[in-house]
Amino acid sequence: MSIDDLARASCAIYVDGRRAGTGTLVTGSHVLTADHVVRGNKPVTIRFLDGFSGEATPVERLPLGLAAEQLDIAVLELVSGTGDRPLPAKLWPAKRLPAETKAFGYPLADNPARGVWRDSRVSGAVQGGRAQLDWDEAGTLAGHSGGPACDKRSGLMAGVLVEGAETGHFDRMVPLAAVRTVWGGYRVPGCSRGKAHGHISPSERQVSRASPAAVTCSGGARRRWLSCADGSVETLDPGSPW
């Protein structure tokens, strides 16, 4: 996925007709954003990058509970049958974070809204299940909240922007691994399921789900897998963490 594809999957969010922040389509009908962008009981609509000249699309907020509110995560569901929509964003498959990120959003002062990218470096985890992104040069702006932060090289979405500090020159995002603790409505990338067959050699000893194995296969490639209680096997892509 290119960063242009991710931009098309991102949308400007309007609360009671006023632009309030940014979100990202992560399934065919669900937009991921920051809770503080849509907090309250006012009507919410969205516009994707290729649809700013048309009517805004109505959305409904999914009830996720207190844990999602504390994490600053919200999910919006597109009303069935409403307008054209882009392909969903492709997601970063690993729990480990990318070293460098790009963040996309629709600054409130940007009129007409065209969207703005900002580059950052991941400095590490902070309290509240978030990760800090140190600005390279220019930082994010009001309106970036809720937008996607992606791996700079692949364009795969790695998290949701939720806060920033101009004086400290940093942003903070909620990584997708943390998002999944409050909402599991999107497919986990980089993981496949299927019945185990005879191609698994005796050297690849079976382990419990709680104890993943990393084994060396023919050709020297390393493969990670988990055996499940139902006899199936989950195979994790090389480089994916446990």
Image (cartoon, rainbow, N blue to C red):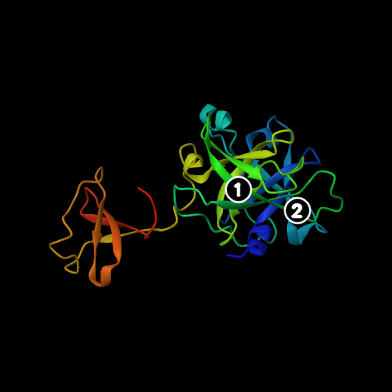
Residue 14 percent coordinates (x, y)? 76, 43
Q: Residues within 10 Å of mark 2 (few under 14, many from 20)?
A: some
The amino acid type, in three-letter code, at marker 1 is Arg
Residue 77 percent coordinates (x, y)? 61, 46
Residue at 75 percent across and 42 percent down: it is: 143
Image height of 25 relative to 69, above or below: below
Helix or strand or loop: what does disc 1 sit on?
A: strand
Asked which quadrant contains residue 170, the reply is top right
Judge depth for marks 1 and 2 and give the one in front.
1
Query: In the visual, does 222 lie left or right of 31?
Result: left
The amino acid type, in three-letter code, at marker 2 is Val
Asked which quadrant contains residue 198, the reply is bottom left
Residue 18 percent coordinates (x, y)? 81, 40
Marker disc for residue 116: 2
Image height of 202 relative to 149, above or below: below
| Image quadrant where one finds the N terminus | bottom right
Q: Is residue 97 visible?
A: yes
Instruction: Tell me the residue that label 1 is attached to.
Output: 121
